[in-house]
C-alpha cells in the first residue's frame, strides 16, 4: 500500500459518527482524527477509494472528505479542508481520547 506523508498528527478518538457515503447514511466509528483527515471503521464494503464522504462529528460538520484507502472494515479519509485545532481539542477532550495510564486510573477508580 502506498501511503502519503501526513501533514498533521493523528489523535485517538472513539466516537460514533453519522456520515454519508455514496449518498447513503452510514454510521461509522471514528478511530482517530487530525486537521487533515481521520480513520473510520464500519461494515465491510461500506466505502471504496475515491468515494466522497460527509460527516457530522460531535454536532459539527467535518470538512468534505474522500476515502484515501480501505483495509477491510477500516478506511482513511482525507479532508478537502482542515478541521480547526480548537475543534479537535474539544472533540478529543469530550470523547475519552486521553488513554494515558493516569487517565485510566481516574476513569475506573481504585481496584
Image (tube, rainbow, N blue to C red):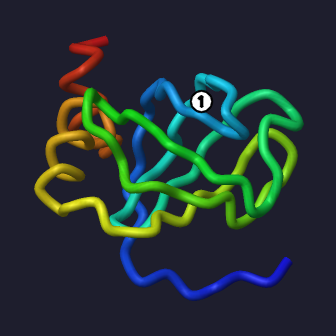
Residue drawn at the location 50% of the way across and 81% of the way down: 6
Specify few, some or many for label 1: CA neighbours under 10 Å numbering under 14, 14-19, or 20 or more. many
Residue placed furthest toward the front? 23
Residue drawn at the location 41% of the way across and 49% of the way down: 12
Residue 44, above or below 76:
above
Q: Which residue is mark 1?
A: 28
**Could you say where residue 106 lies in the image, as x and y percent from the top left?**
18, 24
Q: Is residue 51 left or right of residue 83?
A: right
At numbered mark 1, what does the secondary structure look like: helix, strand or loop? Answer: strand
Residue drawn at the location 87% of the way across and 45% of the way down: 72
Q: Is residue 95 left or right of residue 27?
A: left
**Could you say where residue 102 lies in the image, as x and y percent from the top left?**
22, 39
Residue 68, above or below 103:
below
Q: Is residue 51 left or right of residue 84?
A: right
Residue drawn at the location 24% of the way across and 20% of the way down: 107
The image quarter containing residue 28 is top right
The image quarter containing residue 49 is bottom right
Amino acid at each position: 500500500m502506498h501511503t502519503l506523508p501526513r501533514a498533521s498528527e493523528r489523535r485517538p478518538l472513539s466516537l460514533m459518527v453519522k456520515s454519508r457515503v455514496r449518498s447513503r447514511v452510514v454510521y461509522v466509528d471514528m478511530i482517530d482524527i487530525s486537521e487533515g483527515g481521520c480513520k473510520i471503521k464500519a461494515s465491510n464494503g461500506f466505502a471504496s477509494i475515491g468515494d466522497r464522504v460527509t460527516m457530522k462529528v460531535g454536532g459539527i460538520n467535518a470538512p468534505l472528505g474522500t476515502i484515501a484507502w480501505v483495509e477491510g472494515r477500516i478506511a482513511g479519509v482525507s479532508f478537502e479542508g482542515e478541521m480547526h485545532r480548537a475543534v479537535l481539542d474539544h472533540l478529543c477532550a469530550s470523547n475519552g481520547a486521553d488513554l494515558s495510564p493516569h487517565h485510566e486510573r481516574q476513569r475506573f477508580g481504585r481496584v
